[in-house]
Amino acid sequence: MLDAHPTTMLGNPKKRAQFWVERRLEYFFDRHRPSFDAIFAYLVEGCTLKRPPHVPSEVFLEEV
C-alpha cells in the first residue's frame, strides 16, 4: 500500500530505513501520534487528509 507513495517517508524504503529498530524488529517513528495516524490513514486508505480537530494547525502542518 505504501509503495504507491514512493516520494514520502513511509513509502520510500530508503527514507524509512533510518527508523528501523533492529533489536525490536519494528519501525519506530517518534512523531505526533494523532497527526501520524491521520497521515497514515490518508496514505493507506486513500481517504481525504484531514487534521484531527484536537490537533493545532501548526503541529499538523509540521508533521505533513
Image (cartoon, rainbow, N blue to C red):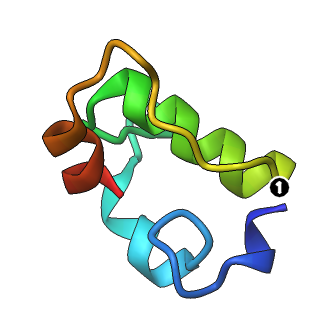
Residue 15 image-quadrant placement: bottom left
Q: Quadrant of the N terminus?
A: bottom right
Residue lying at the far left in this picture: please name it.
58
Element carrying mark 1: loop
Residue underneath mark 1: 46
Q: Is residue 51 left or right of residue 63?
A: right
Asked if 50 appears above or below 1 in the picture, the reply is above
**Residue 17's x, y, as percent?**
42, 68
| Quadrant in which the C terminus is drawn | bottom left
**Residue found 41% across the figure and 18% down from its top:** 53
Identified at 54% across, 63% down, the residue is 10
User: Residue at horizontal 72%, vertical 49%?
Assistant: 48
Tell me where residue 24 appears, x and y as whole percent: 44, 30
Residue placed at 39% from the left, 33% from the top? Answer: 35
| Residue 19, horizontal then vertical, whole percent | 34, 54
Compared across the picture, whether 10 is left or right of 31 comes to right
Query: Looking at the picture, which amino acid does disc 1 mark?
Result: Gly
**1 relative position to 30: left or right:** right
Counting from the top left corner in percent of width and height, residue 39 is at: 54, 46
45 to 30, vertically: above or below:
below
- Looking at the image, residue 55 lies above or below residue 5: above
In the image shown, does 61 or 3 lie closer to the viewer?
A: 61
Give neighbour class at mark 1: few <14, some 14-19, many 20+ (Cα, 10 Å).
few
Mark count: 1
